[in-house]
Amino acid sequence: MLLCSPPADALNSGIDSEEYAVWRAVIEGLLEQEWQHETFKRIVIESQTSYPDYMEKSTRIVGEKWDIPESVINDFVQINKNRQQLENRFQVSIGINLLTEGLMRYFFVEHKLDFTGWDLFYRAYPNSQGLLVLSRVAFYETRKRALVYAGNQRHWLGGAGYLILLKCEGSEWKVERKAAIWIS
């Protein structure tokens, strides 16, 4: 179990074990709340962090409603300007597959016009929830709170993206609030 404290194992990529602990709480929360009636055998995650620029305005609106300091929102936007490579260090209760940039291009660019990308994806990753995208985590209040984006796409017009606020309780991260910032 990872403690909610400053990490000692910062990697060259800048992603430390505490970010993985937050992502683990997000994934477990999605499994328990959003996907509780599903029978997924695996979660497929894009192999790099991602946070599209066009979501900044929605993030700022939600952040203001949640009384998140503007400096935290600015930090969140800034750390998400560059994508970071993820490793399979999520330690969740279900199997994880990381989808590489090459496979992303194959499924969702090369096969976008013929609309077969999602069919090919599900042949490669049967019994999956679709494709989960995670942003970098912005920590604040001495690393006792965390802000992260998670988006899940199931088909061309099926998905949702969430801004998620987490709080460290004891030694575990818990989802405190979640707001949908896009749905298709």
Image (cartoon, rainbow, N blue to C red):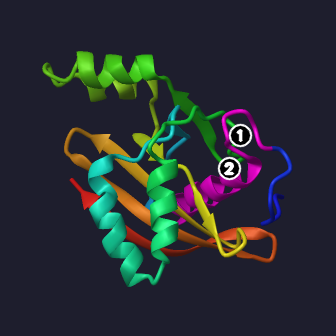
- As helix, strand or loop, the secondary structure at mark 2 comes to helix
Mark closest to the chain's N terminus, 1 or 2: 2
**Is the residue 44 above or below the residue 139 in the image?**
above
Q: Amino acid at mark 2?
A: Tyr
Q: Does the CB distance between marks 1 and 2 fall below 8 Å?
A: yes
Measured from the top left, where is residue 177 in percent x and y?
Answer: 49, 76
Which quarter of the figure is the N terminus placed in?
bottom right
Label placed on residue 20: 2
Instruction: Point out which mark residue 155 bears.
Output: none
Relative to 107, say whether 174 is above or below: below
Residue 100, how many percent across, how many down?
Answer: 49, 23
Q: What is the x, y in percent for residue 97?
A: 57, 31
**In the image: residue 25, left or right of residue 117:** right
Q: Main secondary structure of the magenta part?
A: helix
Name the residue: 72% across, 72% down. 142
Using the image as rendered, state which of residue 42 and residue 72 is in the foreground. 72
Residue 31 part of the magenta-drawn span: yes
Residue plotted at (41% across, 74% down): 63
Q: Is any atom of residue 39 visible in this view?
A: no
SS type, badge 1: loop
**Going 50% across and 70% down the picture, which residue do you hit?**
71
- The CA span between labels 1 and 2 is 7 Å
Q: Amino acid at mark 1?
A: Arg
Pick the residue in front: 27 or 64: 64
Q: Residues within 10 Å of mark 1 (few under 14, many from 20)?
A: few
Give the residue number, with chain letter if any, for mark 1: 89
**Within 10 Å of the Cα at label 2, are there few (<14), some (14-19), or many (20+) other Cα atoms?**
many
Which residues are drawn in magenta? Answer: 10-33
